[in-house]
Image (spheres, helix red, strand yellow):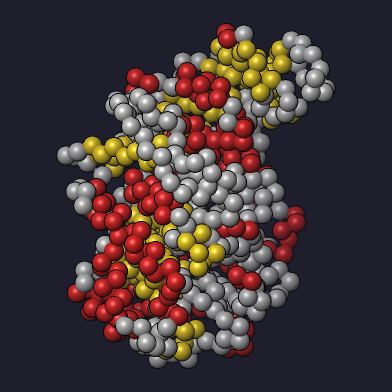
Amino acid sequence: MNRLLFIGDSRDIEWYPIDLNAEDLAKLISEIGFNWQHLPGISGFIRRGQKKLYAYFSIEDENIVVRRDFLGEYLDLAHRYGVKIFLYLNVHWYPEGFKESHPEWLQKRIDGTFKTGLYDLPESVTPCMNSNWRNWIIDVSMRIARKYDVDGIFLDGPVFFEDTCYCNLCREKALKEYGLDLYRMDEWTSKEYTRFMEFKYNSLKEFLRDFRDAVHSINPNIMVYMNGGHPRANWIHGRDVSTQIDVQDLIGAEGGFIGGRLIDPDNNFHRTSITSKFLEAASLGKSSVVFSDIAYKPWSAYPLTSPEIRLLLASIISNGSSPHFVYHYPILKDVYRDVLRDEIRFFRNIEGLGETFSLANTAVVFSQRTADIYFDIDIPLDLNIFSIKKRNKRGFIYSLYGACEILYRLHIPFDLINERTLVENRLEKYDVLVLPNIAFMNDIVARNIERFIEKGGRIYSSMTTSLYNEYGRFRGNFALKNVLKLNYIELDENPFYDYIYLPDEKKYIPTMPYKVKVENIGCNIYGYFIEKRRGVYNPIEGYKDPAILYNNKSIYFSGNYFQTYWRNRFPEYLQIFNKFYPWETLKLGFKNLPGSVEVEFRGNEMSIYIFLINYSGGMERPIREVIPIKNIEV
Ligand SMILES: [Zn+2]
C-alpha cells in the first residue's frame, strides 16, 4: 500500500474567493506534483465582528454564510488533474456571533466565562466537543458527504485549552464517567489529575469516532483526520495520535511550522524529522502527515530560505511521513511553486518509496505521560507554538532532544516509539532502546522492557527513568531496578561547574547538574561525580557517587545526561554513548560523513533506500546555502 501522499494547500483562496479561477488553481497544484489538496471548506480565518462561519461549499444552514460554492466548481476539475481533495473544516476558532446564537456550544473557563481570544482576536470563541455542537458539525459533514464527492475531510480542531473546559456538559461528564469534580481541582491527587488528562484525551477520541462513523455511514471512502498532537505535552488540548489513530484514517501534526530564533534550543534543528518519526510510529501502518508552511513563522508572508524548505521536505519523507505544504499569502505563490516543484517531482519519481518501512534497529522512547506530567512542564498555553510557556521544559523534552541528537550525530538511524508500542510489546525489530528520563512508567511497560533485555536487547536510560508509576506515584525504587542493577537513594543537585571523573581515561568532564544518588548492586562504573565543590576555582578533591554505570545489558546515567548534552554538546557525552553502542548490530556505516548529515535507512521487499540529509550550512540559521560533502564511503 502506498502511504505517501503529497498534499498541497493554498490558503490564499480565501483572499479572493470571488474572482479566483478554479482551473488555474487545479493546474498549479498538479503542476507542482501534489496528488492531494487541503481545500478550505469552513474558513480558518475569523475576523472581528463576524457573526457566522464562512463556507466555500453550498449547504443551507443558519450558522453558515456561503461565500462561494468553490468546492462544487473545483472538485471535478481537481480530479481531472489527478488531485484528490481533503475538505478543510475549521472546528476550533469560531466568530464572536456564536456567543449570541449558540452560547451552550462554547467552551468555558472555570469562572463561567466563555473561552475567548484565540490567535489574539479578543472576542473569538471555540466550540466544546462535549456539547451539542458535535451533533451540528456531524450533521453538516454528513450533508457535505451526501452532496459532494470529496475524498477526505480534514478537521482543524476541535481541541481543549489550558483553561477549559468547564461548561455544564463537561462538568457532568467528568463527574459521571470519571468521578471528578472539576470545581475541586485544588484537592486532587496526582491520580485524579491524570484522570482529568484522560477525560480530555477520551473526549476527543469519542468525538473523532462519532464524527468518522457518521461520515462513513454516507461514504466509507472519505478519509477523516485532524490536526493532531506533537512529540511533547498534549493533554491540555487532548490530542494523542498514538491512541486516536484508531478512530482516524490517517494522522498528522504541525512539525513543519518553523520560525522564531532558529538557533534557540527549543527550535530543534531536527524537529521536523522527529515529528515525522513520532507520527510514523504512531500511525500503525496508516499514512501520517507533517503539516508544513513555507513561511518563516510567524511572518506568514515572508518565506523560509529555499534550503530550509527543501530540508523540511526531505526530512519528512525520509522518516516515513507525508509532506503537506501550505502558503497563506498570495505573495508567496511563486516561491511555493518554484521551490517545491523539483523536490516533489524528485521524491515522486522514486519507485516503491510509499511502501517502505524504517530499518532502524534503535528506538528512542517518547513517553506521553512523562511529557504531560513531569513537574507540570512544557505546556503549550494555546495553539500558537511560538508562545509555549516553559516552566521547566528541560526535564523531559530536552532529554528527548538530547538523546535524538546523539543518535543523529553518530549516524545511528532510529525510530521514535511511544508507550503503546511498549505496552503492546512491538519491540522485535530493535536491538537498542533509549529511555531519556522516562520518569512515569506503568508496570506493563517495565515488564516488557525487562523481557526485551532477556531476549538480548540493550537499554540506555537516565535520571528518574521508572521511578514513578503512570499516575505520578513515587515507587521508592526503580521499576527497572533488576535490569539496571542498582537501587535508588535520593535526588540531588551539583554545581553546574563541577565534573565527572572517568578513571579509565584519567579525565574530568563537565558534570550533569541534576543527580540521582544510587547504590550499585552489580554494575561496572565508568564515571563518578566528584565531591561537591563551592566555587568555580576550588580544588578538585576525590570522587564518590557513580555517574555512569553499565552492565552487559544496560547503561545508566545517574543524572540529566541527555539534557546536558542537548544544552552543552560536550563531545565526551557523544563518545561515551558511542563506546557502549553495539555497532555490530548495524549493517551499514559511513566514513567521511560529518555529524550534520542525518542518515536514515528504509526498505521494502525489493530495495533498501539510504537517505543522507545534509544540514551543513554556514554555522547559522536559516541556512542559505548547503555545503556539499564529497568522498563519502559506505
Ligand atoms: Zn465543555
* Residue pictured at 31% horizontal, 49% vertical: 285
Query: Residue 555's spot in the image, x, y percent?
Result: 52, 21
Choose top left, top right, bottom left or bottom right for residue 413.
Answer: top left
Q: Is residue 255 above or below residue 63?
A: above
Query: Residue 217's spot in the image, x, y percent?
Result: 30, 73
Residue 574 in view here = yes
Q: Is residue 529 above or below residue 140?
A: above
Query: Which one is in front, 53 or 419?
Result: 53
Choose top left, top right, bottom left or bottom right for residue 402.
Answer: top right
> How many numbered marks have been drawn onto this rendered protein structure?
0
The C terminus lies in quadrant:
top left
Furthest-left residue in this view: 606
* Residue pictured at 23% horizontal, 37% vertical: 608
Image side of residue 256 versus residue 21, left or right: right
Query: Residue 418's spot in the image, x, y percent?
Result: 46, 43
Residue 492 in view here = no
* Residue pictured at 70% horizontal, 49% vertical: 391
* Residue pictured at 57% horizontal, 45% vertical: 263
Query: Residue 15's spot in the image, x, y percent?
Result: 45, 80
Q: Is residue 196 above or below residue 433?
A: below
Image side of residue 20 versus residue 171, left or right: left
Image side of residue 375 versus residue 601, left or right: right
Choose top left, top right, bottom left or bottom right for residue 465.
Answer: top right
